[in-house]
Image (cartoon, rainbow, N blue to C red):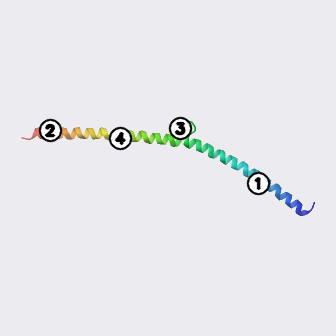
Amino acid sequence: MSKESKLLLAALGRLETFETETIERLTRLEENLRLLRQELVGNGRPGRISQFETLVDQVRTAQTRERGLVAGISLTISALAALLARWMQP
């Protein structure tokens, strides 16, 4: 076997090793991406984004309820103040 043939076989061996390692790394990367997608979006269970959206909706609902309550209390106090002011006039 000539020197060139040996070099070619060695290069092919290194290329096959590189190809195998690259395929293994890509497989692990695909699996990690799949797990990340499941964790973020959810796979039959709420993921982080779904939980976050639910919490945001709950906060918005609570804020709306509190604003209504504050508006009602403000209206009541204003009405009582107006009645007292009218009643206290000579």
Please identify the residue farthest to the front as the structure is shown.
Answer: 44
Looking at marks 1 and 2 on the same chain, the residue that comes earlier in the sequence is marked by 1
The amino acid type found where label 3 is placed reads Pro
Mark 4–mark 3 Cα distance, whole angstroms, equals 25 Å
Looking at marks 4 and 1 on the same chain, the residue that comes earlier in the sequence is marked by 1
Instruction: Estimate the x, y position of residue 49 in percent, counting from the top left.
Output: 51, 43
Instruction: Give the mark toward the camera: 1 or 2.
Output: 1
Quarter of the figure with the N terminus: bottom right
Query: How many marks do you count on the picture?
Result: 4
Instruction: Give the mark toward the camera: 4 or 2.
Output: 4
Mark 4–mark 1 Cα distance, whole angstroms, equals 60 Å
Report which residue position mark 2 lands on.
84
Instruction: Give the mark toward the camera: 3 or 2.
Output: 3
Report which residue position mark 3 lands on.
46
Looking at marks 3 and 2 on the same chain, the residue that comes earlier in the sequence is marked by 3
Instruction: Estimate the x, y position of residue 7 in percent, counting from the top left.
Output: 86, 61
From what the image shows, is residue 11 above or below residue 87? below
Within 10 Å of the Cα at label 3, are there few (<14), some (14-19), or many (20+) other Cα atoms?
Answer: some
Relative side of 88 to 64, left or right: left
Residue at 34%, 38% (x, y): give it.
Answer: 65
Mark 4–mark 2 Cα distance, whole angstroms, equals 30 Å
Report which residue position mark 4 lands on.
64
Within 10 Å of the Cα at label 2, are there few (<14), some (14-19), or many (20+) other Cα atoms?
Answer: few
Q: Nearer the viewer, residue 70 or 44?
A: 44
The amino acid type found where label 4 is placed reads Thr
Helix, strand or loop status at disc 1: helix
Quarter of the figure with the C terminus: top left
Report which residue position mark 1 lands on.
18
Give the quadrant of residue 69.
Answer: top left
Residue at 18%, 38% (x, y): give it.
Answer: 80
Looking at marks 1 and 3 on the same chain, the residue that comes earlier in the sequence is marked by 1
Mark 1–mark 3 Cα distance, whole angstroms, equals 39 Å
